[in-house]
Image: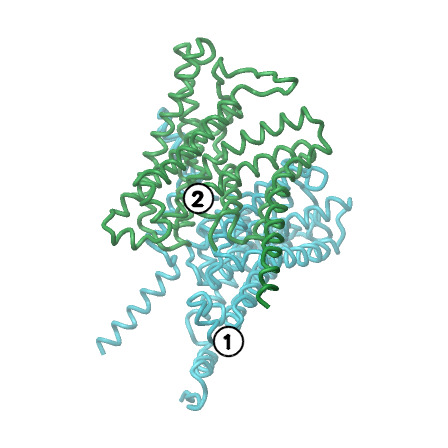
Amino acid sequence: MRAMPKQDSTPVQRERLLERMTRFTRPSFFIQIGLLLALIMGPLVLSSFRVMDVIAKIMVFTVVVASYDLILGYTGIISFAHGMFFGLGAYSLALVIHHSGSPQWYHPFLALGVALPLSIVLALVIAFFSLRVKAIFFAMMTLALAEFAHILGIQWYDLTLAEDGVSFKLPGILSVDWSAGRFLAADVNGRLMTYYLILIVSVALFVGLLRFVRSPVGRVLKSIRENEQRSTALGFKTFKYQVFSTVFGSATASVAGILFAMWLRYVNPESVLGISTMLYILLMVIIGGLGTMYGSIIGAAFIKITETWLPDLQKLAVALFPNVDMIHRLAERWVLYFGILFILVVFFFPRGFVGKARDMITRRKMSSVEND
Amino acid sequence: MDSEIALAEPETRFALDAKKWAFRIGSVGIWVLPIIWIDVTTYLVLTVAGVTMGMLLFLTASGLTLIFGLMDVLNLAHGAFFAWGAYVGFSILNALNALGWVETGTLGQSAGSVLLALVVALAVGAMLGIALERIIIRQVYGDHLKQILITMGASLVMAEIIKIFWGPNDEVVLVPLAFQGSYDVMDVIVNKFRVVAIFIGGAVFLGIQLVLRKTKLGIIVRAGVENREIVQAMGYNINLIFTGVFAAGAALAAVGGTMWSIFKEQIHPAMGEENLIFALIVVIIGGLGSVTGSFLGAIMVGLAFNYVAFLLPKLALGVNILIMATILLIRPWGLMGRE
């Protein structure tokens, strides 16, 4: 017998209690455990570097996309500076190691110590500057600012090595030189260790974001998104909440940037600061669905998997039509298909795949209730 | 009592006037400030270059600001129209060069080739604009987030199509013979094409102002900026006007692209995005929806960019962000925008 919650509690409390009681019996719980196990076992069982590479990138981008979803989907702020924060994190690790000569164990922490305060201060400045103006101004301001950061990355040669990019080594057991024999199907080396570090940190960040949107603060954020005036009327200082969400999301993105740099061991302005990075993040959010944290996994996975295996498809197209020049040109331009996908998703799945799935599930539930 | 007020009034009015005038003189005077670090001849050269750049920026920004003001649409695909204009102009110039019009030939042929390139770019820009507005933008009126996303996607697609047709590499643009080289006015070297650019930019500004202020269409458009529903209620087909303004904005951006490509003598597919950033800064500085504002903003951005690029090359774009931030601090709605 399931004990029903007390009647004098508030609806929110009742819902919470019900959720807590069914926590370990819902299907989503098993999916989560299964996913986690797959992520842990994946590189041990499959000895393909390409697969591990894609999974690591998916994990990093899931965090980036989820933190962007917090700003865009849960708070309703259109910011184009998210890629900039991602790049800030990536560059802080690369530059700390590059400018200090040899990599030391404390360097990732130092990078964290640089990236976090910097991104928090920057996000605060952006927020105070632009949240008071119209939403569309905020979008334009952040777009201009992100482009400025990109140009800074390209032009400030003494600091960032400009378009050459920074390639660097990681310290200790994360280093490519480190190796400790074999375990199952995998070489235990610096790559694998980096993979597990990314796994731990990104899962922690993702769970943190999930907790955040389900916290009372997250609830207020959603109410601001739905109706800012009404939230104000209910006594919430909407500005404070919006600032908080922007800062939290931006700081998370900069940590994800550090992880990304760790995985690639190389950064350049185009790969982390460019407007195309921001576009990919946007596309992932849209595909996954705004305001759905789990959608970020789907969005990131979809884009990263297509991005990895699309070149194969391209070669196939070229091999099939060796003489048609137009096909070659069309096959080369895979960003074009992402662009078309972008438009189609906004048209037909405005709430993304997760949002669409949720709609369908609710509709089915509703219809089954009606049939009863 | 009465006399006291009467005495006080003119004084405060004078104080206000003085403040206003100080502001005006200051805002003009600040552009003379770089003369401290730059010698006069170079300063004049840079000023001409800055005004030219401002005029070209204005061509893109004016469309953006009108589209936003009238339709409440933030069109991030505007940069793509610019790039399309540049590439179409480039192709026309190449085609005419085969006829011997561009790199050789008379003044008339040079002028004709520029004019033809501009007209074709204008037509292509307008057609692209109509297509984009009819197919895509129309579906998402009133939803800023969707507009931003969908125009971003459209700009991506249009930039990629450029790469399919013209290839992804930088191309060198031919400059018509009559506009090559420069005039030398008392040691101040003025590139010939800059004069043309300033002339065309000024003409477009005056043209837009004339249309907006003196024609019936202009009245309808201005009324639409004020209040869309009432214009519709008066029996005007607002959808047609939207399409028209969008097409006009796209055509202006395309013209700006052609001019820019001849001015810079080279083009590349990402030029649209780069220019969009400038145009956005200009539109924010000038105030959304104000043509005069974006004209002033464009000149400001052009001048500041050139002075700073000469003094501290690395900060050139930074100074524009700085101007934008300062203006937003003082007037969050831009120079000429409405609160």
Chain at numbered mark 1: A
Front-lying residue, A263 or A231: A231
Up the image or down, B292 lies above or below A88; here it is above
User: Would you say B322 lies left or right of B72 here?
Assistant: right
Residue B110, position in %: x, y?
44, 14
- Please state the horizontal and vertical placement of residue B203, each as a whole percent of the image: 43, 29
- Closest to the observer, A39 or B63: B63
Residue at numbered disc 1: A235
> Which one is in front, A282 or A298?
A282
Labels 2 and 1 within one chain: no
Residue at 49% x, 41% y: name it: B294
Residue at image coords 41%, 12%: B108
Q: Which residue is mark 2?
A: B65
Secondary structure state at the residue bearing disc 2:
helix
- Chain depicted in cyan: A
- Pointer 2: residues within 10 angstroms few (<14), some, or many (20+)? many
Residue A213 location, x and y as percent? 51, 68
Residue situated furthest front in the rendering = B3
At 73% from the left edge and 55% from the top edge, which residue is drawn?
A: A110
Relative vertical location of residue A116 with respect to residue A11 in this rendering, above or below: above
Q: Nearer the viewer, mark 2 or mark 1?
A: 2
| Amino acid carrying mark 2 in the image | Thr
Kindly identify the residue that appears in the image at 59 percent across and 63 percent down. B5
Residue A199 makes an appearance in the image: no
Specify whether residue B30 is in view.
Answer: yes
Position of residue B48 relative to residue A245, above or below, is above
In this rendered view, identify the residue nearer to me: B127 or B191: B191
| Amino acid at the residue labelled 1 | Gly
Chain in green on the image: B
> On the rendered structure, is A310 left or right of A361?
right
From mark 2 to mark 1, how far is it between C-alphas?
A: 36 Å
**In which chain is the residue bearing label 2?**
B
